[in-house]
Image (tube, rainbow, N blue to C red):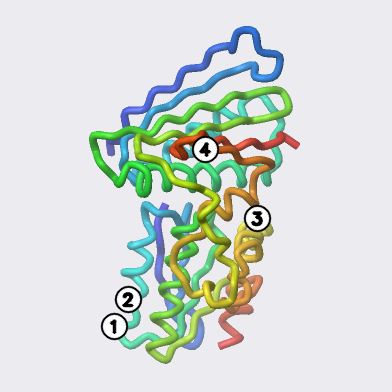
Amino acid sequence: MTSPLRLCVRRTAVPDSREAATLVTLRLPSDVTCIEEAVELVTRHCLAGHEATESIRFRLRVVLSEALSNAIVRGNCEDCNKWVDVRAELGPEIISVYVTDEGPGFDPSTIPEPIRPEQLDEASGRGLFLIRKLVDAVQFNPQGNSICMILRRW
Amino acid sequence: MGFSESKGSGGVTVVKVDGQLIIGNRHELKDLVQAALDRGDRRLLVDFSGTGYIDSSGLGALVSISKRIREAGGELRLSGLNDDLRSLFELTKLDTLFAITETPEQALSSF
């Protein structure tokens, strides 16, 4: 079956940067069925040329899936006219992945932790919590429509 | 990627998750479980021994089907979680909500 995806991955050296040696960018439509292929594509490029533990691979795949879901569903409201941009800065020790949507943004400090006993029966609300737990650092831009997830390679 | 359904010992409905359980396919799992409930099945096992990763939508789908099964008077077991998958349940405290066993065989004998 032909994939409906129209993904573009560019690999270029980052000039004047000691830390990030490679830059990978990818743009995908606001369609949740694109997420799995996008996750595999970005993960493959992020880990290429490096020894990676299964744990790093797993964490990267989960947080990418979460960030793309949030961007497509909550940020872009699945509007097919809007796009999600992924930018991965790949250094020898650190992977920094930015996921940016075209939505108005949100205040991440207002998102409650979903682990209180009375919340366990809720079907949603765990995405950002999981991201925070699985990466080494999380940052947002001031508008709140772009998340940066930082993982150490080991 | 997908779901396969079979009958285990004692007539337990076994749903195996091959690949990922994520936002793009969670409804497929919910529909499959609902169809089993509609047929009268009340003992269900979801086996993750062939699963790569689960996202929060997949976890949410499991919470939803757990509720449906409970409301129908049935029982749900989960099995086959590797250390990484199990960590997702532990981080979110969902390991306290689900009956989790290491292998499908252990799950089947625990009904």
Graded by Cα atoms within 10 Å as few (under 14), some (14 to 19) or many (20 or more), the crowding at tag 4 reads some
Question: What is the three-letter code of the residue carrying label 2?
Answer: Gln
As measured in the structure, the alpha-carbon distance from the residue carrying label 1 to the one carrying label 4 is 42 Å
Q: Is residue A2 above or below residue B32?
A: above
Label 1 crowd bin: few (<14), some (14–19), many (20+), radius 10 Å: few
Image quadrant containing the C terminus of chain B = bottom right
Spatial separation of the CA atoms under disc 3 and disc 4: 23 Å
Q: Amino acid at mark 1?
A: Asp
- In this view of the protein, can residue B52 be seen by the observer? no
The residue at the far top in this view is A16
In the rendered image, which residue does mark 3 sit on? B84
As drawn, the label of residue B38 is 1
Residue A126, horizontal then vertical, whole percent: 52, 59
- Taking the image as shown, residue A91 lies to the left or right of residue B18, namely right
- What label sits on residue A147 in the rendered view? 4
Q: Are marks 1 and 4 in contact (CB under 8 Å)?
A: no
* Residue A56: quadrant of the picture: top right
- To which residue does mark 2 refer? B34
The Cα–Cα distance between marks 1 and 3, rounded to whole angstroms, is 33 Å
Q: Depth check: A25 or B45 in front?
A: A25
